[in-house]
Image (cartoon, helix red, strand yellow):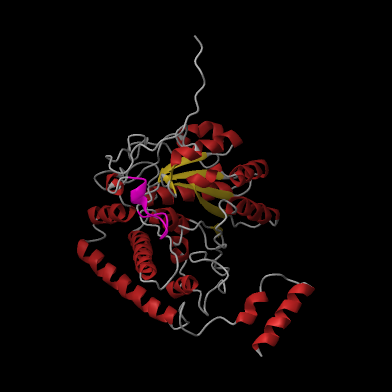
Amino acid sequence: MARTPRLHIPQPPARPGDEPDFSYVELSDAGAVSRPEVTSRARHMENLALELVRVIDDQHKALGPWHPQLDTHDLQVGLRHMLLTRVFDDRMMAMQRQGKISFYIKSTGEEAVSIAPAMALQPGDMLFPSYRTQGLQIARGRNLADLMCQCLSNTNDMCKGRQMPVMYHWARGNIFSVSGNLTTQFPQAVGWAMAAAIKGEDDIAAAWIGEGSSAEADFHHALTFAAVYQAPVVLNVVNNQWAISTFQGFAGGERRPFAVRGLGHGIPGIRVDGNDFLAVYAVTQWAAERARQGGGPTLIEHVTYRAAAHSTSDDPSRYRPRDEAKAWPLGDPIERLKEHMIVEGSWSEKQHEKLVVELEEYCAEAWQEALSYGTMTTGPQLDQHELFDDVLKDIPAHLLAQRDELRSLSD
């Protein structure tokens, strides 16, 4: 007797009140995944899209062919950047709860996804971020006060009050504008990379989206163009298990890893432990070297977990167990790098505690600097006449008329 087709509705493994269940996450042992040559063809390394590149094991040792062999200074810089990102996030979250900014998005648990790639890439490489990769700004040396000013929409706001908080950009730092429209940065990054190749430049592009955004058409458009034209670009999918309140299964994660989607286009796909700073650094470095040698694009899936709420407008306790973050099998990226450095003798708990205090003081000073440019309720405030500037190269007549009318009303 024939079976009647049934519509499948993806279900998360655990809901509020249930025990956390991450049995669906496919893991590999640290150091167990092979590292092919950057010149290898995608068909010869399909295993990388299914396995999980890991370097730091459960005893905090670095193992295997993906070990990037970073020196002590680089490890300390990476730890500092990740820790500063978290301290910054915590302060801005507190400021939002006090009503001093209107909105915020934290990156708690995902700091390695932005810090490690930013350190592995070159300063001239163009970065196309998502709204949870503020670590890119920090790793490239952005003044924290500048980021705070954008969240305050004050007179030093890089967006001049025209964007919601956390939608940063930094031309001098080669970081494109964050967009609230999901996945637009993927085809933009591919286009930028194609232009760099046409001009014979050595710089490449890198872009980040969440796994939920991989269900958008722009994702597939980007992969098609990247594959056809062999664009020198690194395309990152941050699989943090949740797209707002929607489990990653709704984007197709139940069937195959997101990294596998690259293979259908002839693009190497690599699945990496997104909470392992060393593994993320090594995989990004590999993909960047491949792109610079003319090998074309790479799709990287960072397997991580969004430990905090999606944003200050979200309450994750309504759709997942309260203690789910503690059960995440890949741990915390900051703690894992810290413990690795302690085992290697390049760090200590005392140094770590001292650094936390130093970064909290730095963050507090940056907040006071940001407030000097104005708040949401007190001056100084943005000049309303700048509303028409920096939007269009040639301002059309009807906008010029509106600008003149505004000026006449304020005179």
In percent of width and height, residue 80 lies at 34, 64
Is residue 312 located in the magenta-colored stretch of the structure? yes
Q: Nearer the viewer, residue 1 or 209?
A: 1
From this viewpoint, which residue is outermost toward the right? 397
> Which residue is located at x 42 percent, y 54 percent?
310
From this viewpoint, which residue is outermost toward the left? 350
Kindly tell me whether residue 40 is visible in this rendering: no
Kindly tell me whether residue 31 is visible in this rendering: yes
Q: Is residue 159 left or right of residue 133?
A: right
Q: Nearer the viewer, residue 406 or 215?
A: 406
> Which residue is located at x 64 percent, y 81 percent?
385
Which of the 4 image quarters holds residue 23? top left
In percent of width and height, residue 203 lies at 59, 57
> Which residue is located at x 41 percent, y 47 percent?
240
Q: Nearer the viewer, residue 241 or 344?
A: 241
In percent of width and height, residue 378 lies at 46, 83
Q: Is residue 359 left or right of residue 403?
A: left
From this viewpoint, which residue is outermost toward the front? 409
Residue 180's place in the image compared with 26, above or below, is: below
> How many numbered markers are drawn?
0
From this viewpoint, which residue is outermost toward the bottom? 411
Question: What segment carries the magenta color?
Answer: 308-320
Please, what is the dominant secondary structure of the magenta stretch? loop
Q: Nearer the viewer, residue 375 or 156?
A: 375
Is residue 243 located in the magenta-colored stretch of the structure? no
Placement of the C terminus among the 4 image quadrants: bottom right
